[in-house]
Image: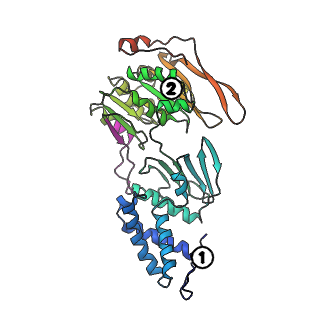
Amino acid sequence: MIRRIIDLEDAGATNEISPEAWGNLRKKAQKKVMDSVPVEHLGKYRDPEAKELVKKQIMLVVENEHPGLAYHAKQNVIERLTNEISGYGPLEDYLNDPEITEIIVQRYDTVIVEKDGRLDITGLKFDSEEHLRLVIDRIVAPLGRRLDYSSPMVDARLPDGSRVNAVIPPISPKGAQLSIRKFKTGINMDQLIKYGSLTENLKKALQACVQARLSIVVSGGTGSGKSTFLNALSAYVPKNLSIITIENPIELNFDHPMVRQWEARPANIEGKGEVDVLSLVINALRARPDIIIVGEVRGPEAFALLQALNTGHDGSMSTLHANNPVDAMKRLCSMVVSAGQLAPDLVPSYVSTGIDIVVQLSRMPDGTRKLVEIAEVMGEKNGEIIINPLVRFKTDNFDGEKVTGHWERTENEFTRENILKDRGVEFAGWNP
C-alpha cells in the first residue's frame, strides 16, 4: 500500500496521498494513457519513447487530480505511476529475471513463479483485485484483446514472444487470474544436452531424421518443453528448403534463411476477423512450402496437416499434448476425425502413413524436462496404429530432489534406416 509518497521541505504543501486516493489516481491515469497513447506504443512498455508518451499523459492527470500537491511529491507520484503503467507493475522484476520461466497469479494476493523447474509462492501481492485487473487490462489491450464478462478469457502473445493467459469471473469465481510463460530464445540441442534432456548420440540420430525429412511429432504434457524441443530440432532442416510455421500464438523462433511465420488470429472485439489454424494450414498448401510446421495441433487442423504430409511435404513437424506415443496417435486420429473429411475407419491408416517418428517428452518430478521415448510409426492394423519403440528413458532413482536415470535402446529394428541412407544421410543408430 502507498501511504506517504514523500516527505518535503515545503511543510505548507500537501504531501500525502491515502491508499484510496492512490488507487483512484492510478485507475484514472491508466485510463488516460490507454485512451490517449497510440496502441503501437502501449505494446512497447520498455521503449523509452513509449515511456515518455505515457509520462506526459500521467502528468496531465496528476495535475488535474492533485493540483495542490507539493512539487517534489508530485514528481514522485508521476514517476511511480509512469514506472508502473509503462510496465507490468509488481510483476516487472520477475519478468526481467532470466531465471524465472513462468509467472502465475493465482489471486491478487498470491503470486507463484517457476525457477529451475520448481514452483514457489512468492511474498509479492497486488494492492487489490482492482489493481490486478488494471495490470491485466494494460497487458491485453495493446494486443487488440479485451477481458470482460462477455469475453472472460484471453490467450495471447506478448511483444517479446512470451505467452499470456488471463481469466476473470465468472470463469474464475474467486477473482482474476493470470499466467505468463516467458519466451526463451536461443536454446539449442547442445544446451538441452547440458540440461540433461537427452544425450549427444540421440541428438545426432534425431538430426539425421530431420535432415532426411522424416515427419516428426513431438508429444508431451503441459510444460514438458515441446515448443523448445521443436525449435531446437528446426536447426537441422536443410537450408535450401522453404518452411512455413503456423502457430497460435507464435512461440517458435527458427534460425533458418527461408522461413515464413504465420499466426492464427482470434476474433476482434466485434466478434469478426478470426483466422484459425485450420485455415492457415489449408492456405499454406497453396503457398509452396517444402515443410509445414504447426506449433501445436489441437483440432481439425490435424487433417490439413496430414494432407500436407501425404502430398509431398516430407519433413513437416508438429507438437501435441499426449502422455505417450500410443496416446499421441490416438489423439491425432480423433482430431482428424473431428474435421469430418474422412470416414472414421479410414483415419488410422491415413495418420500412420503421414507420421514417421514420435518424440515423447516429459516433465519429471524434479521439474526437469527429458526426452523419455522415441518411437517409430509402423502402420495400422485392425484400426490401431502400430508403434515401434526405439529408445526409452529409465529412472534409476528419485530422492525427492533430483531424478537420475539413463536411456536404453530397445531390441526393435529401426525400419526406416534404409530411407535415411537412400537420402544420403549418415546414421549411426539409436544407441544412447
Q: How many marks?
A: 2
Residue 346, visible in the rendered structure: no
Location of mark 2 (residue): 359
Q: Tag 2 or tag 1, which sits nearer the N-term? A: 1
Q: Amino acid at mark 2?
A: Val
Residues in magenta, as a range: 259-281
Image quarter of residue 282? top left
Looking at the picture, does residue 120 appear above or below residue 134?
above
Task: Give coordinates of residue 33: x percent, y percent.
Answer: 41, 68
Location of mark 1 (residue): 4
Q: Is residue 126 left or right of residue 290?
A: right
Task: Give coordinates of residue 207: x percent, y percent.
Answer: 43, 23
Image quarter of residue 318? top left
Mark number for residue 139? none
Kindly identify the residue that appears in the image at 50 percent across and 73 percent down: 77
Residue 411, visible in the rendered structure: yes
Label 2 crowd (10 A; few <14 / some 14-19 / many >=20): many
Looking at the picture, does residue 175 appear above or below residue 70?
above
Task: Give coordinates of residue 34: x percent, y percent.
Answer: 41, 66
Looking at the picture, does residue 271 appear above or below residue 116?
below
SS under mark 1: loop
Q: Are marks 1 and 2 in contact (CB under 8 Å)?
A: no
Farthest-out residue, bottom:
12
Q: CA distance from mark 1 to mark 2?
A: 57 Å
